Amino acid sequence: MKRYIGMRLVYLLITLFVITTATFFLMKQLPGTPFDEEKLNRLPVEERQLLYASYGLDQPVYVQYVRYLANVVQGDFGTSFTYKNMPVKDIIANRIGPSALIGLQAVVLGLSIGLILGIIAAYRHNSAWDYFTMFIAVLGVSVPNFVLAALLQYYVGLKWGLLPVAFWDSYENSILPSVALSVGVVAIIARFARNEMLEVLQQDYITTAKAKGLTNMAVVMRHAVRNSLIPVVTILGPIVVNLLTGSLVIENIFGVPGIGSLFVDSIKMNDYSTIMGITIFYSAFYVFIMLIVDMLYSVIDPRIRLASGGE
Amino acid sequence: MKKKWSTSLLCLLMLVSLVATGCNFSGDKGSGSAPGGTAPAADGQQAKKESVINLSFENEIKDLNQFSTSDNISFSVLNNVSEGLYRLDEKHEPQPALAKGVEVSPDGLTYTFTLRDGIKWSNGDPITAADFKFAWLGAMNPQTSKGGYAFILSDYIKGGAEYASGKGSADAVAIDAKDDKTLVVTLNQPTPYFLRLTTFILYFPLNEKFVTEKGADYALKPENMLYAGPYKLTSFDPASGATLVKNENYWDNANVKVEKINLKVIKEQSTALNAYKAGELDRVMLSSADVDTFKNDPEYTTDIEFRTNYIQFNTKGEGTSNLNIRKALQLAYDATILEQVILNNGSKAATGMIPVQMSGVDHKSFRDLQGDLIKADAAKAKEYWEQGVKELGKAPQLKLLVPDDSLSKDLGTFLQSEYKKNLGIDVTVETKTVKARNQQMDEGNYQFGVTGWGADYDDAMTYLDLWANHTPYRGNYENPKYDELIASAKKEVDETKRINMLLEAEKILLAEDAVVSPLFYRGNSFLQKPHVKNLIFHPYGSPVEYKYATVE
């Protein structure tokens, strides 16, 4: 197990290196500069050159790349071009919190409701419950979350005044965005859980368990649920990464100072150091979550061994 | 087994609460917006008692460091937590602020400012002439000035241009802190709007000792700044907003009526409108789509900015190198349709480059003095077009470059259809990101493109100067007569003569040489709560004053 994790960590570093390199050179192909060109145009050529030089942008791209890599290895991700004096590290640290909070709440909410709905739907296959759940699932997948977000904001926030319309003043502000984000999760999880449950319920060992005289409830809870979780865990990885790294639309609608809008803006503004910082952060996070998911498999199903020889 | 699951659930919950503690909610307890339960009306009442104004920005507060800052939102904050020698009043005229007054030499070149007595930083240190010198030099120093805004000082102050381009030394810059109270500045040319310039953020003072001590952390947190203005920051997060409270050390503290200003970042216009309706905001900008709904509302207002959007012709571009073609393209669309149908937000159809309300001379605006330069005329446009085609030998294939925001795209479609209707030609609209648009224009790789310019100060020079630098972005325009007018206007001491030169220059640029074609002067539509009064928005430079505001 230890060796397996060690190997995975080595792969993680290689992956990160490849992603960093590719992003760096692609990013430099973006048209324009990280500055406001309309203002810059007003500056004499020498002053413009000085400005580029003060950021090292006058050097050839490969020199910039080597310098950047050397800095990153020392833990220095540079300062942002947009937030001119702020270290990229601090910006990411400030902005990931709100995104992670609403993302995590959305995952917890979506997972619990999704699982319950899915399991009930499978258990009461072809009943009204089943149809209701699938209706919700189709709705959840096909209605974009920003539509729901706008509705929640209008009714819960404005009409009924139950929760704040927007902003990021206190914990209450995180509820509506979390709910808006969670609906998609509910839909996906419910469908997966239902399908997988249905399959598992056809298995011989379920018949055996029933034959032993266990109640339906006990059969489902003890034997079926656990075995139907594996595909759910598989899709949970990308879902978690997706949600924890922020959603541009939801963040904008609710005024959440999250990382989703930061990433999109940094690309629009050619904020090189921020683009790189977030790319590295996202990829590291993604690879790490994937590792956790792989490890979870063996927890859920002990037959899955991560490395030859096992634990 | 069951235990295991409940343990992991517990872990998850703990993780959530851990994240929740680490995500810096910006609200300070017990004030500001009261979420939940409270009815909107009660919220408004409460706000009145504490004299709070809640406002929003449509983008992040990017940089509060005076040396490098360059965006309007940061300017809005800085203008209220600091102050220059002069400050713009309710009528957008400069009035003595940290300076008691000024003496200008007869040749208009030397300004001797005397500072007000008893002015103090928020930490109690006196504000001295040296603080201005330090700040101004820093804003020009290529090492610290990173916003591309150094020209707002270096264009005027003697020795500034050399210093800003890294060639001259700081000692050669003609800013002299004679003593604590006296600041003497020598200019390159007589600049009638120099006092207006001193109201601009980059002309504010900074305390050298404090700034040096904070180093790289300066202006990243409220406690890492010193305040000289009517307000000081108590909280600041670039992405969620800032809180301003009255600065008790401010010299005119007694005339600052509103205790506290809450500033929130909200990018989505519809969200801001909902927050306004819920009583969480006191003023909101309306999108064009919402204007019709609120046009007759008593809370509805509009304002106009000193920002002109226009078409830039590339005078070396294929087809657009021909004067008649350019004139045809200039006259073939009706900007009033643009104003009424597409913009519908308080913006005005443009008939010249210099925006309405920009100062001219003798209390007359520049626009009034000049009159309309460009007015749509389909018949004439057609004539010019045919003449141009004859000269070129064939009709040019035209491509209009527009940035990819939704307004500009609509604008592109509008121009396309007008050209089709009035000239019978098919113009291709090439949509690019702002960055790509800028690059293409910088490289001269365009025929004509939609762009705009916002004034840095209240004088026509802020616009007309741009076409004297002959860059591809400004259409590769080069006319010795035009350059001569701009150069002499910069030296002219007689105000009427100077304005006449600028009037002549605008006429050449638009009517004679047809280098640009005006689209609209940007305006905005708002809703503002009736209990908030005297919130002053300037059409240029430092965007907003909270100092004069009152809450009833």
Image (cartoon, coloured by chain):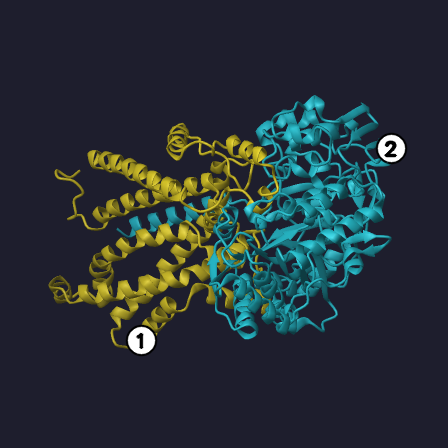
Chain colours: A yellow, B cyan
Q: Is residue B524 left or right of residue A26?
A: right
Q: Position of residue B262 (x, y in %)?
A: 67, 50
Tags 2 and 1 on a common chain: no
Q: Position of residue B174 (x, y in %)?
A: 75, 27
At horizontal 18% and vertical 65% (from top left) the residue drawn is A199
- Which residue does the numbered mark 1 point to in the structure image? A131
Q: Is residue A109 above or below residue B343?
A: above
- Residue type highlighted by circle 2: Ser
Local SS, label 2 = loop
- Residue type highlighted by circle 1: Tyr
Near-viewer residue (B356 or B494): B494
Residue B144 falls in which quadrant of the image?
Answer: top right
Q: Position of residue B550 (x, y in %)?
A: 80, 54
Report in which chain the residue with disc 1 lies: A
Near-viewer residue (B546 or B457): B457
- The residues bearing labels 2 and 1 have C-alpha atoms spaced at a distance of 87 Å
Q: Position of residue A207 (x, y in %)?
A: 13, 66
Label annotation for residue B105: 2
Q: Is residue A177 above or below residue B440?
A: below
Q: Is residue B39 above or below residue A173?
A: below
Residue B421 falls in which quadrant of the image?
Answer: bottom right
Q: Is residue B26 left or right of residue B197?
A: left
| Image quadrant where one finds the C terminus of chain B | bottom right
Contact check, label 2 and label 1, Cβ < 8 Å: no
Instruction: Judge the density around disc 1: few (<14), some (14-19), many (≥20) Cα neighbours within 10 Å.
Output: some
Q: Is residue A15 left or right of residue B536?
A: left
At horizontal 68% and vertical 61% (from top left) the residue drawn is B523
Q: Is residue B119 above or below residue B230?
A: above
